[in-house]
Image (cartoon, grey):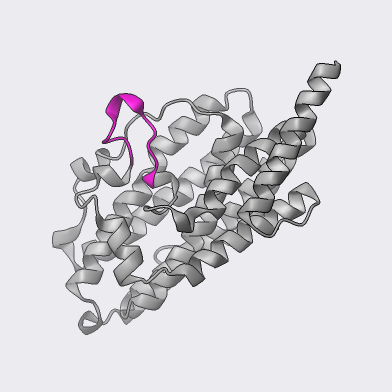
Amino acid sequence: MLYPELFASLERVRWDMSRDIPWQDFDAARLTDEQARTIKMNAITEWSALPATEMFLRDNQDDSDFSAFMSIWFYEEQKHALVLMEYLRRFRPELVPTEAELHAVRFPFDPAPKLETLMLHFCGEIRLTQWYRRAADWHTEPVIKRIYETLSGDEARHAGAYYKYMKRAIATAGAEAKIAFAKIGVLMASAARTAKPLHPTNLHVNKSLYPLDTVQSRLPDPEWLERWLDTQIHFDKGWEGKVVQTVLAKLSTLCDRTIENASELNRYRKELIAGLEAKTAAA
């Protein structure tokens, strides 16, 4: 089982909201209204770990190890929402999300192939690691800078945990797992060609609720994410490249094959599918 090891490693680096966040260093002159509103949107987005956890538990009932890890992931993601809300409560109370605004992002996700979902969230954590690094750079108020730096570290560790479950999946499912991971990897590595950022909170997840079936569509400001990325934290092609290269490097290690771009990954995926079909036909 991976859960005991992950619990111990994440427990060692867990931060305390009252002890490790320098609330006393707050500088009101260095927080703008624009910046404060983005904190609210991020707090609500982090709250969506609730329906994501419900999805993971539903779709992984045959995997108690991974389901147990969800207790850690859910706790830490909800803590992210909480620390952002605590910041607003202390310094911009008029912007604290209401319970109705938080509850709006709790809605059922349609069942999906669990290997693809695992890869999607692995990529999402890598992307969020970099988004929060840029947010820390963009903000000028020292306390919120520290908060975003702290959250970025958590997201990087979550990506590492998902990676361990991906490695386990390849050990047990072989080519099937590699095909699933490559499929999502191609989409993520091609993100620069899409009109919207590829992240779990911006993907459609419930056909019956379309088009209000993304987390971002249920925020008080549904267009916030693109504006935050493009004109505020300036998550440009260079930063997107860091995400893509990290995803490709991790897949290269998992698959024991050098993969440098989306085209190479897609060719590898097709090779895996052909090999699996040939093996099935022979059987």
Q: Nearer the viewer, residue 261 or 252?
A: 261
x, y percentage for residue 85?
Answer: 28, 58
Determine which quarter of the picture holds residue 136: bottom left
| Residue 121 included in the magenta stretch of the image | no
Residue range highlighted in magenta: 202-214
Q: Is residue 178 visible?
A: no
x, y percentage for residue 46?
Answer: 37, 50
Q: Is residue 143 visible?
A: yes
Image point (38%, 70%), residue name: 135
| Residue 206 included in the magenta stretch of the image | yes
Question: Which quadrant of the figure contains the N terminus?
Answer: top right
Determine which quarter of the picture holds residue 119: top right
Image point (50%, 58%), residue name: 127
x, y percentage for residue 165?
Answer: 67, 42
Determine which quarter of the picture holds residue 246: bottom right
Q: Which residue is at the far right?
A: 282
Question: Which quadrant of the figure contains the C terminus?
Answer: top right
Image point (47%, 68%), residue name: 237
Left or right of 51 in this view: 119: right
